[in-house]
Image (tube, helix red, strand yellow):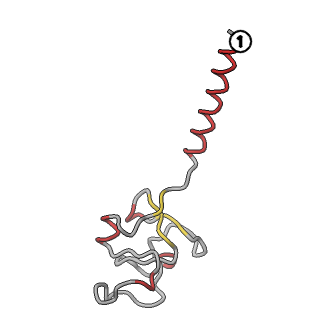
Amino acid sequence: MQNNRRTFLMTLAAGSAALTTTAHAQPARLNEKDPQAVALGYFEDATKTDTKKFPKYAAGQLCNNCALYQGKVTDAWAGCPLFAGKQVAGKGWCNAWAKKG
């Protein structure tokens, strides 16, 4: 009986630790092939933007200096309301880029 109780408590503790780790995990990074990313012309590296397809792009426009970027300018990845639950690259770009005011 004592052994079963010990096994149960150890299993419970391990499960709690796993839940805590999962609850505080970072949101997934946006993949360039994600349908929403493709629709908005998102690129993790702004310098790789297809300027013929997205003529709005101008050098220096980055996710981290966009009005929609939900992180600090120095953050490598942060949230964006256009891609709920995902993080965009600070050095990325998409066609919805808007200058911070």
Quick one: 84 or 31, which is closer to the camera? Answer: 31
Task: Tell me what residue is drawn at x 45 percent, y 74 percent.
Answer: 44
Q: Between residue 18 and residue 64, name the one nearer to us.
A: 18
Work out whether residue 98 or residue 8 is closer to the camera in this orientation and state it.
8
Determine whether 18 is above or below 36 in the image.
above
2 relative to 84, above or below: above
Q: Which of 31 and 54 is in front in this view?
A: 31
The residue indicated by pointer 1 is 2
Q: How many marks?
A: 1
Identified at 34% across, 89% down, the residue is 51
Residue depicted at x 41% and y 90%: 58
Asked if 91 appears above or below 29 in the picture, the reply is below
Q: In which quarter of the image is residue 31?
A: bottom left
Q: Which residue lies furthest to the front in this view?
A: 3
Q: Is mark 1 on a helix, strand or loop?
A: helix
Residue found farthest to the top: 1
* Residue drawn 47% across the image and 80% down it: 62
Residue 98 in the image: state x and y as whole percent. 40, 79
Q: What amino acid is labelled 1 in the image?
A: Gln
Crowding at label 1, few (<14), some or many (≥20) Cα neighbours within 10 Å? few
Q: Quadrant of the N terminus?
A: top right
The percent position of residue 34, horizontal first and vertical second, equals 35, 64
Left or right of 62 in this view: 15 = right
Q: In this view, does 55 lie above or below 100?
A: below
Left-right relation of 11 to 95? right
Indicate the quadrant where residue 55 lies.
bottom left
Q: Residue 22 at what x, y percent from top left? A: 55, 45
